[in-house]
Amino acid sequence: MIFLYEKIKDYFLSKGWKELKKEFKYKKELDLIFKDELDSIIFVRILSKDELIDRNSLLDNILELFSLKEEVNKIYIAMPKVYVSIIDSSPFEEYGIGIISYDEKKVMEISPAKFFKTKSKIEEEKMEKLIPFETLKLKEELDNIKKRLINLEEIVRSLNNEIKILKSQSKPIIETKISKEEIIITPPSSENIPSFLKDNPWIEILAKRGREEKIAV
Amino acid sequence: MYGMNEEEYKKIYVFGADYGTSDFKYGPITCGEKPEKIENRGYFPDKSSIMYKITGIEKDIIVGKDIPLYLEAREDLSTRLIYPMRNGIIEKNDEKSWRIVKEISKYALESFKPIEEKFKGFYLVASLSAIAPKYMYEKLFEIYDDINKEEKLIRAATIIPQTLAVAISHKVPTCVVVESGHGNTQVCPISRYPIRNAILAINRGGGDANALTAEILKDSGYGDLAKEEIVVRKIKEDLGLIPRDLDKAIEYAKKNPEKFITKYKIPGTRIIVNLDNYSWTRFLIGEYVFNPNHEIFQSYFRRGMPKPSDVKIGDFYFRGMLDFGEAIAESIEKCPIELQPYLYKQILLSGGNFNWNVPEQLKDIAIDSATKIKLLLEEKGIKDTNVILTENPQFSVWRGCIVYGYAVPYDYIWSWDRMEGWLKYY
């Protein structure tokens, strides 16, 4: 288990997160606490196979961890891979708790944790509401500019497509005039045609399909 | 049609679709030299899985470049991730594979659908394996009809054999195209038309060379690596050699082992493979593809390596042990005698199974695919042959489709007798 504990810890550390030695209510020996680049606090509980035999144990853990939501920003439960594929995920979704699967080979995030606002964050937001009117107006302007930029990108993309089509219309790749009686094929007129169309004897052969006697083979 | 006649319209909206065994290449004439490429596969997500619920996937089949984003680390992945054209043929009742073909076709056409009003659907040229039975043509035309019921993307469609497309893109009207892929090899003579009665199929391809490479790895003490298909294929591609003469090559390699021992590091890993005293077996890998009849291969068959067998798939008998030289000769001999000398003068080799390394220092004993075929034909008394390894083999079929669609007149209507022409949808 210690090997797996270190593996799970490495997984989070590899994201550039820092381990915290903070104490919390219900913190167990194998629980991990991290701080990410945005200073969010993440709580990870590692459950072993033995702890998962009893269904109540899983629910107890979910409820216990959910009570931490005002103190930490994200909560994860790490479980053996084999259990992740068989458990009912709905309580996790309901409580916003993320799932991590682990085995001897790999640790991976199966579903993300919901971001909880801690008590201190809620206080901060209350302060933000007192931001002056001018700042809010600037924010609104910025949102408008973003929308206009997205629209412009869309227009450029569709213009690009149209240019492609127009190019192929204005410079026909090869002039091939076909009538029931006569087939006139002029050589390629443009230097920009793909190499496989240039001087290809099949153009003449294929242009006669349906206009020549069937070749019996 | 905005002042444009139908023939002009067709030339602007020709669309090529090459249903290859591993990759699907697609795109309109405006793509230029290279088409778009996705893997020819589809993924059926497990609807009961957590991932399915959490990601809120609406489709029950996924195709295209996003597949890796949906894959799950589940044991039944092999049954959910399906390559429908692995052997060039789809069984008539293989509904899952046909669904993938439909989704892939729709995905390709939608991704290039122009926005202008004059667009009334593409002139679609699809390409299937030369050994594809008639029901596959029927089924594909039905699929295109279904796609049109949802959105009018196809004005007319036609289907041509991949071997014909190769000949077209290489600008050779009279030739023999030998196409060798993962599962099998086809020999198809062409003289302005594919000569269907002379097509010969061989039940041997790159996958068989992989099987032999796995046996060699086991003998050399790398049994664990032998189970990893991708690793085995990589080792085959990088270490396998085609011998000019197998007996002489083995004798030379055993006398001069230092010239053949290579410490091969598998890219992106720490694994190093050293065949050491078994380095002479590098020649077996190449020889086996072209000619599996040497007695040395019997010991591998006796130890359980599957022997390429004769089988009937679709309308074709696939021969297991036929060497490539004999196969080409047999195929050409089914053509009119007057035509035969011309066919021997243009033999085009196409497909990934013909790409082999020839190290500079081993040039006297290791050779390329074209030389090997030439030698195999010489052994049968056929001289003055010209064998060419095709350039850009992965795009040549798509290119052939574009030329075909561009040149074949719009009013040349599909005929089931000729297996040619345009099937008009509206």
Image: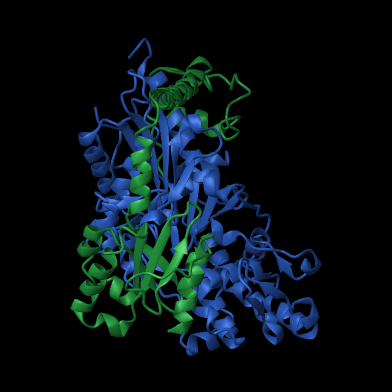
Q: Residue at x 63, y 74 (%)?
A: B270
Q: Quadrant of residue B288?
A: bottom right
The colour scheme applied to this rendered structure is by chain
Q: Tell me if residue B125 can be seen.
A: yes
Q: Quadrant of residue B25?
A: top left
Callout count: 0
Query: Residue B25 versus residue B182: which sits nearer the camera?
Result: B25
Chain A colour in the picture: green
Q: Residue at x 28, y 58 (%)?
A: A96
Place of residue A44 in the rendered image (x, y in percent of width and height, measured from the top left): 38, 68
Q: Quadrant of residue A70?
A: bottom left
Q: Residue at x 26, y 80 (%)?
A: A52
Query: Residue B184 versus residue B70: which sits nearer the camera?
Result: B70
Q: Is residue B32 left or right of residue B245?
A: left
- Chain drawn in blue: B
Q: Is residue B363 left or right of residue B213?
A: right
Q: Residue furthest top?
A: B3
Place of residue B122 in the rendered image (x, y in percent of width and height, measured from the top left): 35, 30
Q: Is residue B236 above or below residue A198?
A: below
Query: Residue A3 versus residue B264: which sits nearer the camera?
Result: A3
Q: Is residue B48 above or below residue A160?
A: below
User: Which quadrant is the N terminus of chain B positioned in?
Assistant: top left
Query: Residue A205 versus residue B362: which sits nearer the camera?
Result: B362
Q: Tell me if residue B92 can be seen.
A: no
Place of residue B227 in the rendered image (x, y in percent of width and height, measured from the top left): 48, 78
User: Which quadrant is the C terminus of chain B positioned in?
Assistant: top left
Q: Residue at x 60, y 33 (%)?
A: A195
Q: Is residue A164 above or below residue B57?
A: above
